[in-house]
Image (cartoon, rainbow, N blue to C red):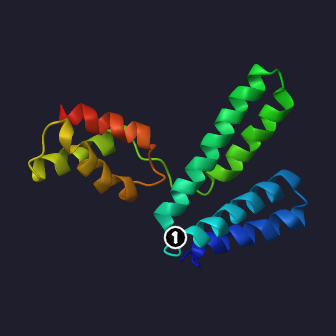
Amino acid sequence: MIDNPIKKKLEEDLKQALREKNRIKISTIRMLLAAVKNAIIDNPNFSEPDFFKLVEKEIRKRKEAIAFYTQAGRSNLASKEKEEIEIISTYLPAKISKEKVEKMVREYIENNGLSGIENLGKVMKHFRSRLAGQIEGKELAEIVKKLLQ
């Protein structure tokens, strides 16, 4: 269960935002806490990698909303979504360089004697939880595909 530093940090950040009366931060952190609580209900074994996936999902939602708002000429709503992305992004670990990921994937593939696209799932499964929040799944899949061919 996520009764760990991440949830505590969210709660502390919410208290701080309430003291600062920062409305956008308050609503964004409350939304994240609600999403975490719902995820814990769905999965009692909710872990840190699950939290990072949840945060990435929330960021993706906002990026999609920005595209729609921009298309509709609603720059005020798009800027609100951008602010939320900035706040939510603070809960992700530092991004890892593609070169470093490529090196890690290459070593794993060589050490396990894997080749061919049929091993894509095996390699992705190995790295998805280890690199949660540090690289997007789409980028990881591109690197793995390139190295398995």
Q: Position of residue 135 (x, y in %)?
A: 44, 45
Nearest to the observer: residue 97 or residue 75: 75
Residue in the image at 71% along x and 64% along y:
34
Secondary structure beneath label 1 = loop
Question: Given the current orientation, which residue lies at the most extreme left position?
Answer: 113
Identify the residue at image location x=69%, y=45%: 86
Give the residue pinned by disc 1: 46
Left or right: residue 38 compared with residue 122:
right
Q: How many marks?
A: 1
Is 119 situated above or below 66?
A: below
Asked if residue 14 is positioned above or below residue 27 in the image, the reply reads: below
Q: Is residue 92 above or below residue 101?
A: below
Q: Choose between 40 and 73: the one closer to the eye.
A: 40
Which residue is at 81% across, 70% downward? 15
Q: Residues within 10 Å of mark 1 (few under 14, many from 20)?
A: some
Furthest residue to the front? 42
Residue 68 point in image, percent of width and height = 73, 27
Residue 92 visible in the current orientation: no
Q: Residue 90, located in which quarter of the rendered image?
A: bottom right
Within the image, what quadrant is residue 116 found in?
top left
Q: Residue at x 24, y 46 (%)?
A: 105
**Can residue 109 be seen in this snapshot?**
yes
Q: In the picture provided, is 50 more to the left or to the right than 77? A: left
Question: Which quadrant of the rendered structure holds the C terminus?
Answer: top left
Give how far across and how far down residue 2 sits, in percent. 56, 74
Q: Is residue 108 left or right of residue 15?
A: left
Above or below, 53 relative to 147: below
